Amino acid sequence: MDVIVGGGVVGLSVAWRLAREGRPVTVVDPAPASGASHAAAGMLAPVSEVTYTEAPLLRLGVAALRRWPAFASALAEDAALPPAGPEEVGGLDLRAEGTLDVAFGADDMAALDELAAFMEKLDLPVERLTGRECRRLEPMLAPSVRGGLLAPGDAWVNPRRVTAALLAALERRGVNVVRARVSELVRTDGAVTGVRLAEPPAVPDEGRGSAPLAATGGRAGGEVLAAGRVVLAAGAWSGELAEVPVRPVKGQIMRLRSPQPLLTRCVRGTVHGSPVYLVPRGDGELVVGATQEELGYDTRVTAGGLYELLRDARELVPGVTELEVADVVAGLRPGTPDNLPVIGPGRTPGLTYATGHHRGGVLMAPLTAAILMGEESELAALCSPGRFQEIS
Ligand code: FAD
């Protein structure tokens, strides 16, 4: 039996893949789909996310994006989602109209030129556009936009629909999702052989004698779940259970609502030195993200964070300030020292990692599951836990 610790997009994708292969699997998470995956914008954008120092990440991202259409179709079928509209796959709001990176000043334009040259060298499809061409594609862009770079292959998806579909698919396949926190990995003769469930938090009883048990899905705290293999997919919290260099990187993000979609594709730009992006959903929602803050496990949504997001988004698309605010949230990305995920077995027998996906966990969830099934040995080497001395 594989026990997956963490039911975010990564852990659930791995569990679903294992279940489809007929392997016995259990997921343990006190609140599945509530971590970074709940906050994520869902951009599947390896090309427009690229920076010059991140060539390995780009390779992973491009391979990950290729897996998404088949992953989404199979998931929609397995979760029995209602039929999708003409432009989306399987009710997950998977869209592939590309990302438009826009520039305002001479410096931004020069940076886009350099980026375009870099991408062309890598044979990545991009188109250089004038300001007028950008506005022809996206009429709501600010008149001050001077030029842009279109990455036509980039896509995006609604991560909340993805995790809901994964949970539904797991339920249909009879996979047990235990609503409990893992307090520690259980070790026998140096190998990980299971997980111990935490005592449920003290819930004011109010006559409901069974409340604490209900919080662990009917299991008693302290109980050990035996496992042939434990897959650690606890996102930013992975370092609490094993020696793995994953740290929380806070991101604040907001969801706005408009009766008519303001944009048809993802738009991003750099304003006052910080990157901002806008991601349109099929239902009129517009996601504006995201801050990047090194503040430990702080998940407060702050006035300053929201102010910066809106101020910068308005520079790109002035109409955003007219929209209704639907949701504001802060999530913790699982960051690693080299920005690459940690996927595969470590030095401890019985323990496998699927964590550290930082800014790209939604994009890389299907690829992560494939790597753990042994399908991508070259890419697996880039994510190998063994590259970090301290990993257990
Ligand atoms: P999480 O989703 O955080 O899930 C970890 C789970 O582990 C949680 O459910 C938690 O309850 C559980 N857990 C923790 N400790 C324990 C324990 N002790 N026992 C049991 N369970 C435990 N990525 C993209 O690809 N595209 C984007 O556009 C994008 N935008 C983002 C925007 C923001 C604002 C943020 C914050 C992130 C964004 N990301 C994006 C990154 C992406 O969200 C993450 O890389 C991804 O969600 C990581 O998934 P995960 O399953 O590893 O972690």
Image: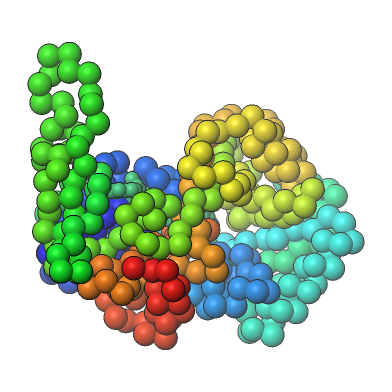
Q: Is residue 142 left or right of 283 when viewed as pictured?
A: right
360 is higher (above) or lower (below) than 219: below
291 is higher (above) or lower (below) than 119: above
250 is higher (above) or lower (below) than 377: above
Q: Quadrant of residue 378?
A: bottom left
Find the residue positioned furthest to the top.
206
State how many labels appear: 0
Identified at 79% across, 58% down, the residue is: 103
49 is higher (above) or lower (below) than 265: below
Residue sitting nearer the eye, 80 or 291 = 291
Identified at 16% across, 29% down, the residue is: 212
Q: Is residue 390 left or right of 371 when viewed as pictured?
A: right
The answer to whether residue 203 shows anywhere in this view is yes
* Residue 313 rendering spot, x and y as whole percentages: 70, 43
**Looking at the image, what colour scheme do you see?**
rainbow
Q: Quadrant of residue 366?
A: bottom left
Q: Is residue 9 left or right of 136 when viewed as pictured?
A: left
Identified at 50% across, 69% down, the residue is: 340
* Residue 154 rendering spot, x and y as whole percentages: 56, 66
Identified at 43% across, 52% down, the residue is: 236
The answer to whether residue 320 shows anywhere in this view is no
